[in-house]
Image (tube, helix red, strand yellow):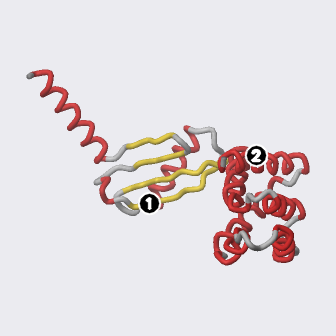
Amino acid sequence: MAKLVSKTYGDALFELALESGQVDVLYEEARKMLDIIQANENLVKIMNHPKIVVEEKQKMAEEIFKNRASREMIGLLTMLIAKGHFKEYSNVLQYFIQQVKEYKKIGTAYIASPVELSLAQKDSIRRKLLDTTKYLQFEFQYEIDPSLIGGIVIRIGDRVVDGSIKNKLARLTSDLVKTKLQMS
């Protein structure tokens, strides 16, 4: 159900953004509101508290974001509160942000390597990804994973390119085991 809520409201916000010509504005607002909500545990606790009435939560949300967000974003927030779906607000915003990125052809690449990559290596990866994907630009998330031994692992959405030595050794071991079994 959580996925249905985030998709339903995220798609509605995306359609509104397209129709009103506010894709960039609502995208930036969504990113800021996501940061605010994720950084403020007390706000989340209050908005999810069962003993605080819905109208009070809506009023509080309107006051907090009155000069910080558009009426569209505040309207989304108060609607989710009214429907009892505030706990899904972060997921709705993340879904919307992902929709905008796809629309603007901005990819997110998660890159794992056993050591810190140099600027030249990062630039080479960026250029290769731009040449071989549909995206016009990328946001990169780098992670150091010493267990990879060498090489890199790149994940974009549900696609994974594993060029690590760890993976190559695992495949070699598997091939050797198969060969041994065939010889027996």
Q: Nearer the viewer, residue 46 or 103?
A: 46
Measured from the top left, where is residue 41 in percent x and y?
64, 75
To which residue does mark 1 refer? 143
Q: Estimate how packed mark 1 is, as few (under 14), some (14 to 19) or many (20 or more) residues with alpha carbons within 10 Å.
A: some
- At 52% across and 58% down in the image, what residue appears? 141
Kindly identify the amino acid type of the residue bearing the numbered disc 1: Glu
- At 71% across and 57% down in the image, what residue appears? 93
Residue 61 lies in quadrant:
bottom right
Kindly identify the amino acid type of the residue bearing the numbered disc 2: Thr
What element does badge 2 sit on?
Answer: helix
Question: Quick one: label 2 or label 1, which is nearer the N terminus?
Answer: 2
- Numbered label attached to residue 8: 2
Measured from the top left, where is residue 50 in percent x and y?
72, 69
- Which tag is nearer the camera, tag 2 or tag 1? 2
Give the Cα separation between the discs numbered 2 and 1.
32 Å
What element does badge 1 sit on?
Answer: strand
Q: Is residue 116 left or right of residue 81?
A: left
- At 69% across and 58% down in the image, what residue appears? 88
Q: Is residue 70 visible?
A: yes
Residue 131 lies in quadrant:
top right
- Numbered label attached to residue 115: none
